[in-house]
Amino acid sequence: MDKYMDKVLIFADKISNNKYLKAVSNGLMATLPINIIGSIALLLAVLPIEAWKNFISTINIGGYFSVGYSMTVGVISIYASFLVGHRLATEFNQSAVPAGLVSMFSFLIMTPLITIDETTTLDMSKLGAQGLFTAIICGLVFSRLYCFILEKNISIKMPEGVPPFITDTFAGLIPGIISGFIAIIISWLFGFTSYGSFSDFIYQILATPLQSLSSNVGSLLLIVFIQMTLWFFGIHGSLVVGSFITALYMPMDVQNMDALAAGVARSELPNILSKSFYDLFSGIGGAGGTLSLIIVILIFSKSKQSQTVAKLSSAPGLFTINEPMVFGLPLILNPIMAIPFILTPLVQTLIAYLAIWSGLFPRLSGVQVPFGTPILINGFLAGGWRIALLQLICVFAGCFLYLPFVKLMDKNNEKNEDLSNENGKLGSMKETV
């Protein structure tokens, strides 16, 4: 077991500390403020309340809400290309802002052009969800190229006494020119292919198959299973799989928001699964769906230890913070609780998927709700009262899964607590004698 654990720890450490995966995960997570602003603008533009529609039509502000969405989520790939490149340069201890700018203009060079009414411009559809994988690749490749050139000291050296900001500017000039020239050549060469552009090549060869994979609920269940298995062995599984979740499922949120902005009905949105789906249903209250466990312990448990931990964990659990429960009960390496701890988020994910797939509950709009928003409130913001109701159903399902195991754990705890009390009494009698 020790040898197995060592191998698992080494593998998990390599994944969670991989510079490129961290750059992708942190870079995409850094787009969250942009996504939230765009999500709010979209909600205000399409809010299905007749009085509100009439009001925004009267004051003629609806178009501005649409612009707010178009300039945030609608061009999310521009922000992502900069932020991924920025984060990667930070990992290599190089100037982050110039690296992010090189990544961004390289991505824009790679974006195909279209002609509308004799005006040639960038294809806006490739600046949103369709261009996200191209943005990630450009962020990684060109930022790393920029850092590599600087590491080899291929730069313009300024004499002593020149202000540092000027020195940094000229130091990045040659790496920036080389990176931009390479991006231009690649873009030009792809113009001779059947794909027409590098962006279309990436979308057809890489993005489409990956999105087909991520639209399969089995793939998400496998990711959640790996996450929970790592958690059981004391490894922060959410950090390990976070990069994959963000890269695979955030584009699906953006696709749903684009469709909603285009007037598509909620029932006709392209994706059931998305990052917001994972955040809302794949472990309500934190990894393991521990909000259900807290409820079961508070209602049914007679163990003083379990009750104390549950009471301390109840408030954080409502905000999806469950470390007090995971480490305080504990759930890590707890053979009694292993089955429900791993199984609950899987069941919650499957129940939510089937409920939305059947049409009983609406598809998620893709709106990004900040981490830490209380349970049910986050569901309401992401999809309305019916999504909040679906969260509640999933919580009750988790309660049924945890209940028999909590009772079994109670028996063991009560024995230990009784034994401890008896030892305490014997100790007091000895002191009296």
Image: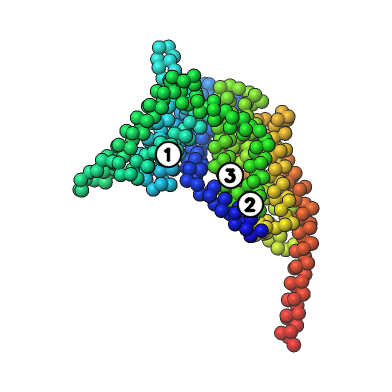
Q: Which residue is denoted by mark 3 in the rendering? A: 241
Residue at image position (73%, 81%) is: 428
138 on left or right of 162: right
Question: Residue 82 placed where, x, y %?
Answer: 42, 36
Secondary structure under tag 3 reads helix
> Marks 3 and 2: CB-CB under 8 Å?
no
Label 3 crowding class (10 Å Cα cut-off): few <14, some 14-19, many 20+? some
Q: Position of residue 375 (x, y in %)?
A: 64, 44
Q: Position of residue 363 (x, y in %)?
A: 65, 30
Which residue is drawn at the image coordinates 67% and 35% (left, top)? 217
Q: Which mark is residue 271?
A: none
Gap between marks 3 and 2 measured at Cα:
11 Å
- Position of the C terminus by quadrant: bottom right
The residue positioned 63% from the left and 42% from the top of the image is 223
Kind of residue indicated by mark 3: Val
Q: Is residue 16 left or right of residue 224?
A: left
Viewer-proximal residue, 374 or 59?
Answer: 374
Secondary structure of the residue carrying numbered label 1? helix
Q: Earlier in the sequence, mark 3 or mark 2?
A: 2
Q: What colouring style does the render use? A: rainbow
Marks 2 and 1, how far apart at CA: 30 Å
Q: Which residue is mark 1?
A: 85
- Please state the horizontal and vertical placement of residue 98, each as a whole percent of the image: 35, 39
| Residue at x 75% of width, y 68% of height | 417
Residue indicated by mark 2:
231
- Distance of label 3 from label 1 (alpha carbons): 21 Å
